[in-house]
């Protein structure tokens, strides 16, 4: 690092800024932020050219955070002329953007600088600042003699100008400059439009601009762009056709119902045409966004030729909803098609077909589901029994019940889920299954019985299972009883608060809170003294759901004598109770010595918009635990505003933890 300014500032040792150690130099620069910028600026400007990006970043932060920074914007600007130090130029750009409108007068004064590189920097910085008052400078630069400046002007207009940037960008398209036209079309796509179709459609005759035109129309084109975009599906070049698909997807996502209807009518007219063949050639891709767009368009077109490829795309869980809609739109032959595909499918494909049968309720699916239940592959049996439950085919109750003894755990779980669903259409048959399982010797089967009794709302049998010798059976019965919102059910649940197993007590305490039964207040209050902390937590949370003065009294008492785990449960309970007293308790928790409790309290107070945080956030930014400081930074970042920015900048000057510093810098960049 240069030592040329070493003698100019005796308030800080120059040797530290010239040290061979990166961290020493960074700390030296950070220390300069506490001094007036008029005394330290020359050292900071030199530090912006340091070989270490960390030192450069610190120098930019120290310069830009100073309230005097605008007074020295010209000196900062001159760093842009540093031909042999790219890091220094980049630091200057970053700092000038950070200065915002304070830098605009200096930038405007250099808009006609004789150096084309400097003029381009000016345009890029103005774009980064994004002040609407600078749009005339960006528009004027579209006519700059330097092609790089013109391209930068177009790019930044698109990013910052919005709809007001569309007319000057369209006017600049008249230039016989291919690169500029490409940049303008990309910029128009970012404006949000509307971009008149007639203004950009002529450029489709240029093969090098086709993709850019389609992207522009997809992202920002006016509503009459639908017909031009659909024509793009007829393109013979694969890349252009793919771009048209993406553009149509973007157009449909951002357009109103009427424009989408018109687009879909045009797509439907492609049924039976070579367009479908062209789209199918694009299906072999790992790009999930493209695949989703293709499945959606093929579904709108409704051509049965696409059923096979769409069916294979169902293997992706994230694409399943689009695939189901697409297949559903391919006509009444889908049942026949699935049967034909099932015969020659492998195990994964058979499972996918059965999932589709279940989701769509495909007519004639009975034979496929029956065959799937007898399949040797467990994933096929699982998919088949799930489909039986979702299609509500009561005839499959006995076969689903038989699979409760399957060797595969996933199949057994799917069978239970299917029987729970079938309880709504075949209650008598499912009740018979539940009755037989209640007396089974295996605890797993009795747990299954409890789940089925819950679905059947069979209070009598649930009460019996709540006395089972197996704790997990009792727990399942308690969870089933929770769905019965009546006095008798509450009575059984209250009795289970004294169960010998803590998991059962937790389930009972949780269930009483979900039902908000006031008669459970005192029993739950007793449970807040349970020997198991997790049981105490469940009881306290349920008291919060029930609410009222008595619940608040018990929660406050628990909070006074709680450890961290129970304190967090008490805070969660207090967050559900309105009133000044609950707020006072949460504020007190925010001043406790437990960092996890403090973080939780900050989150609750922030959500409630409590002014206490505004008055105490500076102290929280100095908290000894890094994660509490991080929570305070998050609060300020989400609140925003000038005061928040100032506090964050001050905090950055003293923060030593890298993660917290990164969070502060991230929010400062967002709030700039």
Image (tube, rainbow, N blue to C red):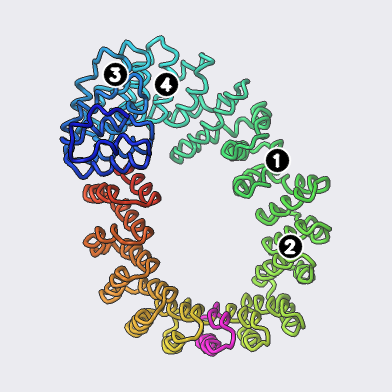
Residue 207 seen in this snapshot: yes
Which circle's residue, 1 or 4, is located before the other in the chain? 4
Q: Residue at x 60, y 37 (%)?
A: 287
Q: Position of residue 54 (x, y in %)?
A: 37, 38
Query: Is residue 579 highlighted in magenta?
Result: no
The N terminus lies in quadrant: top left
**Gap between marks 4 and 3 measured at Cα:** 18 Å
SS at circle 3: helix
Residue at mark 1: 307
Mark 3 vs mark 1: in front: 3
Q: Nearer the viewer, residue 672 or 308?
A: 672
Q: Nearer the viewer, residue 67 or 357?
A: 67
Q: Which residues are magenta?
A: 482-507
The C terminus lies in quadrant: top left
Residue at mark 3: 119
Q: Is residue 434 left or right of residue 61?
A: right
**Gap between marks 1 and 2 measured at Cα:** 24 Å
């Amino acid at each position: 690092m240069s030592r040329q300014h070493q003698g100019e500032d005796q308030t800080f040792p120059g040797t530290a800024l010239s040290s061979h150690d990166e961290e020493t130099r960074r700390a030296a620069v950070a220390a300069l932020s506490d001094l007036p910028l008029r005394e330290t600026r020359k050292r900071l400007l030199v530090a912006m050219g340091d070989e270490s990006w960390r030192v450069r970043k610190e120098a930019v932060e120290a310069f830009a955070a100073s309230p005097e920074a605008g007074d020295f914007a010209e000196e900062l600007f001159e760093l842009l002329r540093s031909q042999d130090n790219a890091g220094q130029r980049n630091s200057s750009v970053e700092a000038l953007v950070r200065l915002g409108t304070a830098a605009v007068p200096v930038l405007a004064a250099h808009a006609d600088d004789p150096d084309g590189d400097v003029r381009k920097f000016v345009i890029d910085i103005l774009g980064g600042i994004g002040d609407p008052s600078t749009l005339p400078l960006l528009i004027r630069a579209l006519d700059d003699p330097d092609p790089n400046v013109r391209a930068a002007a177009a790019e930044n207009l698109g990013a910052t100008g919005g709809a007001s940037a569309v007319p000057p960008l369209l006017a600049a398209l008249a230039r016989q400059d291919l690169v500029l036209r490409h940049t303008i079309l990309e910029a128009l796509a970012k404006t949000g439009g509307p971009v008149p179709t007639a203004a950009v459609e002529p450029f489709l005759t240029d093969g090098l601009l086709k993709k850019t035109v389609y992207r522009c129309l997809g992202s920002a084109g006016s509503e009459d762009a639908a017909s031009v975009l659909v024509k793009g599906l007829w393109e013979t070049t694969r890349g252009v056709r793919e771009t048209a698909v993406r553009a149509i997807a973007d157009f449909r996502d951002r357009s109103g119902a009427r424009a989408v209807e018109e687009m879909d009518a045009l797509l439907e007219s492609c049924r039976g045409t070579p367009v479908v063949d062209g789209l199918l050639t694009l299906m072999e891709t790992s790009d999930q966004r493209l695949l989703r767009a293709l499945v959606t368009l093929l579904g709108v077109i409704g051509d049965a030729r696409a059923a096979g490829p769409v069916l294979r795309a169902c293997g992706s869980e994230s694409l399943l909803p689009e695939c189901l809609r697409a297949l559903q739109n391919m006509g009444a032959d889908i049942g026949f098609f699935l049967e034909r595909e099932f015969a020659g499918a492998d195990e994964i494909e058979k499972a996918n077909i059965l999932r589709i049968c279940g989701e769509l309720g495909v007519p004639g699916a009975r034979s496929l589901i029956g065959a799937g239940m007898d399949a040797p592959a467990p994933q096929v049996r699982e998919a088949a029994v799930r489909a039986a439950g979702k299609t509500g085919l009561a005839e499959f109750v006995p076969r689903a019940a038989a699979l409760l003894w399957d060797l595969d755990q996933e199949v057994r779980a799917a069978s239970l889920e299917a029987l729970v669903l079938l309880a709504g259409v075949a209650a008598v048959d499912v009740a018979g299954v539940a009755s037989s399982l209640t007396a089974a010797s295996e605890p797993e089967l009795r747990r299954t019985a409890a789940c089925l009794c819950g679905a059947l709302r069979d209070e009598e049998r649930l009460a019996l299972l709540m006395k089972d010798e197996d704790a997990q059976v009792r727990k399942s019965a308690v969870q089933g009883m929770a769905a019965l919102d009546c006095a008798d059910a509450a009575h059984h649940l209250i009795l289970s608060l004294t169960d010998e197993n803590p998991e059962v007590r937790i389930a009972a305490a949780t269930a009483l809170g979900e039902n908000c039964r006031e008669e459970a207040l005192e029993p739950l209050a007793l449970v807040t003294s349970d020997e198991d902390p997790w049981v105490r937590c469940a009881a306290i949370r349920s008291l919060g759901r029930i609410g009222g003065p008595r619940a608040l009294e018990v929660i406050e008492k628990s909070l006074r004598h709680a450890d961290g785990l129970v304190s967090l449960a008490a805070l969660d309970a207090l967050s559900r109770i309105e009133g000044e007293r609950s707020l006072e308790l949460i504020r007190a928790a925010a001043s406790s010595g437990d960092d996890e409790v403090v973080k939780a309290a900050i989150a609750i107070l922030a959500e409630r918009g409590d002014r206490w945080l505004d008055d105490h956030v500076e102290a929280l930014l100095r908290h000894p635990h890094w994660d509490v400081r991080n929570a305070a930074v998050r609060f300020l970042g989400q609140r925003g505003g000038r005061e928040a920015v100032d506090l964050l900048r001050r905090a950055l000057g003293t923060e030593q933890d890298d993660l917290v510093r990164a969070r502060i810098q991230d929010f400062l960049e967002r709030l700039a």
